Amino acid sequence: SLLEETSLPLYFGWFLLSSVQVKVGCTAMDFLKTLDTLEAFKKHIADFTGQAENEVDLEQYFETKETLHCTTKFCNYGKADGAKEYAKNPVVKKSYGSVFSLSLTTLFVTPRTVGARVSLTEEQLQLWPADTEKESEEGIPGSASLPVGSRAHITLGCAAGVEPVQTGLDLLQILTLPEGEAVEEMELGSLRYYGEGRWMLSLREPICAAACFSSFYG
Ligand code: A2P
């Protein structure tokens, strides 16, 4: 029936509680503000600006997101593969509305997106569809061999014209590369460069973020 077809959400995920959204948003802004002043970043600035300019304000470059969340299953109102099965999963039903503690271990930036990597616990992995990383193998060779849950992230911002789905793909792509060149010890952690405008900051202290498992209809 029409009701059944429309009763599935756009996506399921963990939604950061509002006080945590502010904390994560501010940490990301601090990182972007510092990153674009580093000599190491300026050396590779053409990754972001092309040849035309030798400066970029990353805070302006990215359109930051509201309703920060970590998508577990993109359902597209039931049209996505496996959406119905996911919604019926007893663990999903049981967990719906519960608050979890997410561990944000890494911030990453590319010319397209900025995001935070989420390191899932065994319990949290039960809400993670097992085939997520395999689905991107065609576009990102090697992603199917990454550990389950590798794609888990929070989209913090996207460059103009870039869809948020890109953030997870950017993360997977970085994770398939050999470890990047260590370029700088920052207050927040150590910064590595992965080529083609891809930067990753391992947080000295992971951010512990309270988040409610729920869904978004839009
Ligand atoms: P992400 O989880 O990386 O932030 P949109 O506004 O484009 O419809 O996306 C809504 C949410 O669903 C976003 O959080 C987005 O990306 C995620 N998303 C969109 N498309 C996909 C997809 N094909 N696979 C996985 N996640 C998706």
Image (spheres, rainbow, N blue to C red):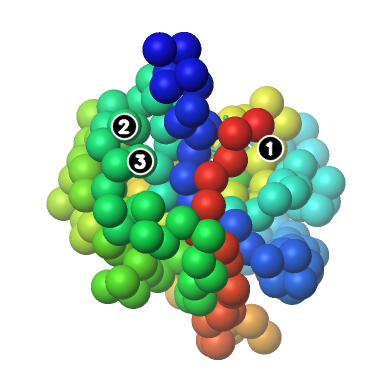
Identify the amino acid type marked 2: Lys
In the structure shown, which secondary structural element does the residue marked by tag 2 occupy?
helix
* Residue 85 in the image, given as x and y percentages of width and height: 26, 36
Return the residue nearer the eye: 33 or 86.
86
Mark 3 crowdedness (10 Å alpha carbons): few <14, some 14-19, many ≥20: some
- Residue 32 lies left or right of residue 70; in this view the side is right
Identify the residue under disc 1: 159
Disc number for residue 87: 3
Identify the amino acid type marked 1: Ala
Residue at 75% from the left image edge and 65% from the top image edge: 18
Q: Is mark 2 within 8 Å of ligand 1?
A: no
Identify the amino acid type marked 3: Ala
Q: Are marks 3 and 2 in contact (CB under 8 Å)?
A: yes
Going from N to C along the chain, the mark reached first, 2 or 1, is 2
- Residue 211 lies left or right of residue 100; in this view the side is right
Going from N to C along the chain, the mark reached first, 1 or 3, is 3
Image height of 16 relative to 73, above or below:
below
Residue at 36% from the left image edge and 47% from the top image edge: 173
Residue at 42% from the left image edge and 22% from the top image edge: 4
Mark 2 crowdedness (10 Å alpha carbons): few <14, some 14-19, many ≥20: some
Q: Dividing the picture into quarters, in which one does residue 48 lie? A: top right
Q: How many marks?
A: 3
Dividing the image into 4 quarters, which one contains the C terminus?
top right
In the structure shown, which secondary structural element does the residue marked by tag 3 occupy?
helix
Identify the residue under disc 2: 84
* Residue 2 in the image, given as x and y percentages of width and height: 46, 12
Return the residue nearer the eye: 161 or 56.
161
Q: Is mark 3 within 8 Å of ligand 1?
A: no
Image height of 84 relative to 191, above or below:
above
Q: Are marks 2 and 1 in contact (CB under 8 Å)?
A: no
Q: Are marks 1 and 3 in contact (CB under 8 Å)?
A: no
Dividing the image into 4 quarters, which one contains the N terminus?
top left
